Image (spheres, rainbow, N blue to C red):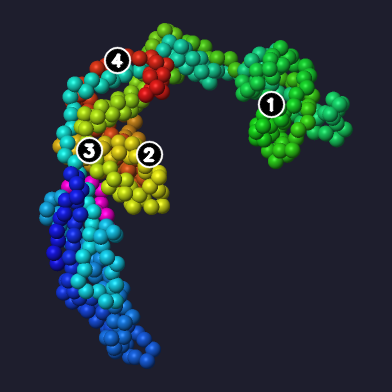
Amino acid sequence: MNIELQKTGDLTATLKIDLTNADYQDNVTKVLKDYQRKAQMPGFRPGKVPFGLTKKMYGQAATADEINKLLSDALDNYIRENDLQLLGNPLANTEKTDQVDFAEAGDMSFYFDLAMAPTFEVTLSPELNIPYYNVEASDKMATDYLADIRQKQGEMSEVETVEKNDVVNGDFVELNKDGSVKAEGLKTSGIINTALLKDEAVVKSFVGLQVGSTITIKPSEITENNTDKATMLGIEPEAAEDINSSFNFTVATISRMNPAELNEEFFEKIFPGEEIKTEEEMLARIKKEASQSFGTESDRKFFNDALEAIISAANITLPDEFVKRWLVETNPEKLTAEDVERDYEGYGRSLRWQLIENKLVTEHNIGVSEEEVKDVFRGYFRRPGSGEMDDEMKARIDSIADSFMKNKEDAGRIRNQLFEKKLIDLIKEKVQPKQENLSYEEFVKLASTK
């Protein structure tokens, strides 16, 4: 066997592997003799099938298998022994490699195209000038959120006149097209939640109605959803499917959600143990919690901005034609040459970032241990402020965490999250981003334009 590396470009080369019959024939013969010992064929006792017949039946397949094994080992060994840092995988060069006749295999040459990983430096310094946006909740956001909480924690009461967002119970009577009551039409009791009505004109038609008032409506015009229509009419969804009639709706009761009072009991229920006493303190607490919850979005924006800046600073050159071919040949069921050509800018960007990420992982020893993943699962079952756990409780939580670890999809998701956080923390530490405060609305606008 002879192996020769032929340079074809700054980052590409072709590996030529010359095989002689002597490189593989002994192994082929050994395999065929093993087949002979195990073969069972009519007219011959087990293990007594003539070698010539065994070779005729299995010789080509055995030769192909042995040559493929020999080539695979030769490729792997050459790459490892010469410490070649490859981009992607070796690709068979079918233009240079002659068609092999495994029935008459002799000396032959095989060619494989390689791409070398480019050399580059990763810049992580304040000179990248990457901002970090601290997102602040606006007064309006806090006020709206408080109103929503009060509504959800409120109590229902019956009233006499309908206002917007009231829930109206009443009786439906189906009508003919001329507006007269349908003799054998549907008569049922149902409910209309005006807060869920999309058409403002329909909402206005309900506002001001009183108990005993009657209004003509067409449920199919209020909602096209059969489930919603069925709920409105108090019938099964299947029965509502073909209903397209108008109905007289007579109001029976009107229910209104009264927002929870702003008092210390309410504050304690929402934020227990924080001794909030006024609406102003409550709004400040909501804004603080909201701003903290935006941290994930801030990190994502920072990471995306950092990714672009780091890729640009690294100025990585790729062997584009090889990469395009590699993408197609390794994803034949998903990608065509046209797909890759059209979206190559994105593929190139992803590949450049993968190279940078691998370098950062190696240089800064970034990794996530099984114990770190398991500790996240443990955290699901630790109660805040519960103090030190006894050995029995620790063992119980460990057992539960072990069962969660068996779900490879969930464990992989946690591992990826921990890895990304470590990577973001490293970049933050090195680039020292400039802190900028933005309202949530400003942040959304900025993120949507970039």
Look at the magenta stretch and give its main secondary structure.
loop
| Relative vertical location of residue 406 with respect to residue 50 in this rendering, above or below | above
Q: Quadrant of the N terminus?
A: bottom left
Marks 1 and 4, how far apart in space?
A: 46 Å
Q: Secondary structure at mark 2?
A: loop
Counting residues from the start of the chain, the first of labels 2 and 3 encountered is 3
Residue underneath mark 4:
436
258 in the magenta segment: no
Query: Is the residue marked by circle 2 packed among few (<14), some (14-19), or many (20+) residues within 10 Å?
Result: few
Q: Nearer the viewer, mark 4 or mark 2?
A: 2
In the rendered image, residue 33, in percent from the top left (x then y), is placed at 24, 81
Residue 450 seen = yes
Counting residues from the start of the chain, the first of labels 3 and 4 encountered is 3
Q: Secondary structure at mark 3?
A: loop
Frontmost residue, 218 versus 160: 218
Query: Is the residue marked by circle 4 packed among few (<14), some (14-19), or many (20+) residues within 10 Å?
Result: few
Q: Secondary structure at mark 1?
A: helix
Residue underneath mark 2:
343
Residue underneath mark 1:
222
